[in-house]
Amino acid sequence: MQDVLVDRSEMAPSILPADVPELSDDECLAYLVRAVEAHDSARLDEVAALIGRLAVTIE
């Protein structure tokens, strides 16, 4: 039986949320601050996505 090399990097899903644009950590934090300061419950998904984006960076 022959060994088969598989490039798993192409098969792995991204751990970054798809709905958050490519941002630097500083930009992401600035967006998060503005979203939290707004006290707008309609922005909860955005806040969660930004926190998720920062959490990935911290890990």
Image (cartoon, rainbow, N blue to C red):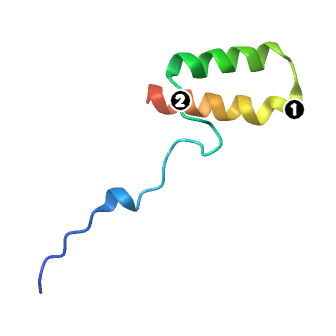
Residue under circle 2?
55
Residue extending furthest toward the bottom = 1
x then y, percent, for residue 48:
69, 33
> Could you tell me which residue is drawn at 50 percent across and 45 percent down?
15
Q: Secondary structure at mark 1?
A: helix
In screen coordinates, is 59 left or right of 9? right
Kindly identify the residue that appears in the image at 73 percent across and 32 percent down: 46
Categorize mark 2 by other alpha carbons within 10 Å: few (<14), some (14-19), many (20+). Answer: few
Image quarter of residue 3: bottom left
Indicate the position of residue 54 as horizontal and vertical percent values.
54, 27
Query: Which amino acid type is marked by label 2?
Result: Ala
Three-letter code for the amino acid on which mark 1 is drawn? Ala
Pick the quarter of the image with the N terminus: bottom left
Would residue 2 be found to the left or right of residue 53 on screen? left
> Observer-nearest residue: 13 or 55?
13
Residue plotted at (86% across, 18% down)? 39
User: Is 57 left or right of 17, judged from the image as shown?
Assistant: left
Relative vertical location of residue 53 with respect to residue 15 in this rendering, above or below: above
* Marks 2/1: CA–CA distance: 22 Å
Q: Nearer the viewer, residue 20 or 4?
A: 20
Q: Residue furthest left?
A: 2
User: How would you rate the neighbour count of disc 1 (Cα within 10 Å): few for under 14, some for 14-19, many for 20 or more?
Assistant: few
In the displayed structure, 30 sits above or below 46; it is above
Q: Earlier in the sequence, mark 2 or mark 1?
A: 1
| Label ID, residue 42 | 1
Question: Percent position (x, y) of residue 57?
Answer: 46, 28
Mark toward the viewer: 2 or 1: 1
